[in-house]
Amino acid sequence: MRRTWDSKAMLLEIRNLSAFYTGPGKLVLEDVNLSTAQHEVVALLGPNGAGKSTVLKAIFKEAQIKDGEIFFQGTNICNHPSNKIAHLGIAFIPEGRRLFRSMSVEENLEMGGFILKDRNELKGNKEKVFQLFPFLGTRRGQAAKNLSGGEQQMLAFGRALMVNPKLVLMDEPSLGLAPQAVDKIFNSIKIINSLGVAILLVEQNVKKALEVAHNAYVLHLGKVVFRGRPSEILSSEKLKNLYLGG
């Protein structure tokens, strides 16, 4: 039976997902269910090795799906290649950013817009990014490797926005950054979300993640052990002590 899609329903819906990495073959995720509504920030929290990043990688085809389904705007994307997923409106910012370090800021943005066929759209999207992050415009000719860690992360944000995404997957955007840079990163996450972009956020900085999230999931050993509002997590000493390092 053809599945009908309600525009008011979930943007992303993951059902009973089990996933692994090629090689070891051991399940990293087991029977995971989660969803993201339109314009929503959802935080994925939990200790190291819980499977948080694997959720994002399974969506974007960097992990192998054993069982389950992933729907994006009503379309099952489990068998879609990464480039088709990008065309549908999902952007992925991996841990470590994966910038083209020897290329300029502007060249990195253009690489982010590789799926755009219209050169005017590509140019227009670059200017939108420069308006959103003005310092990138002033350094458009500078090599990415010469930016600070925080600035590189902002460039990764800008690169993701080049494809006009409806959903951005963010994997540990504040990892290894100085506190001042972390504040700027989370302010940028708020700005991106204010544009109507939904965000699925994997982040070790629990406090900061919960400040920007509308909903949150806690994972442990590849399974969802809690789903709820940030306030529920913050008020649960048991949850914080067992899964979030106090």
Image (cartoon, helix red, strand yellow):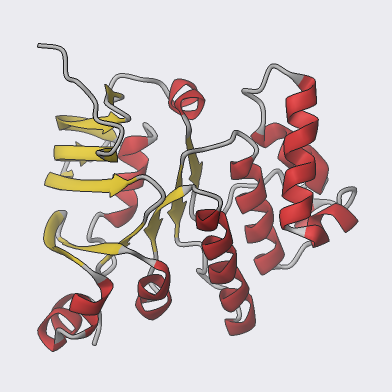
Residue 89 in the image: above or below residue 52: above
Label count reads 0
Does residue 20 appear anywhere in the picture?
no
Residue 212 percent across, percent down from the top left: 42, 69
State left or right for residue 123 relative to residue 75.
right
> Which quarter of the rendering shows the N terminus?
top left
Residue visible at 58% across and 36% down in the picture: 164
Residue 195 in the image: above or below residue 75: below
Closer to the camera, 178 or 188? 188
Residue 40 percent across, percent down from the top left: 37, 54
Does residue 72 appear anywhere in the picture?
yes
Residue 175 in the image: above or below residue 66: below
Residue 9 percent across, percent down from the top left: 24, 38
Residue 224 percent across, percent down from the top left: 13, 57
Closer to the camera, 112 or 220? 112
> Which quarter of the rendering shows the C terminus?
bottom left
Quarter of the image for residue 17 reads: top left
Residue visible at 67% across and 31% down in the picture: 113
Quarter of the image for residue 138 reads: bottom right
Residue visible at 15% across and 43% down in the picture: 27
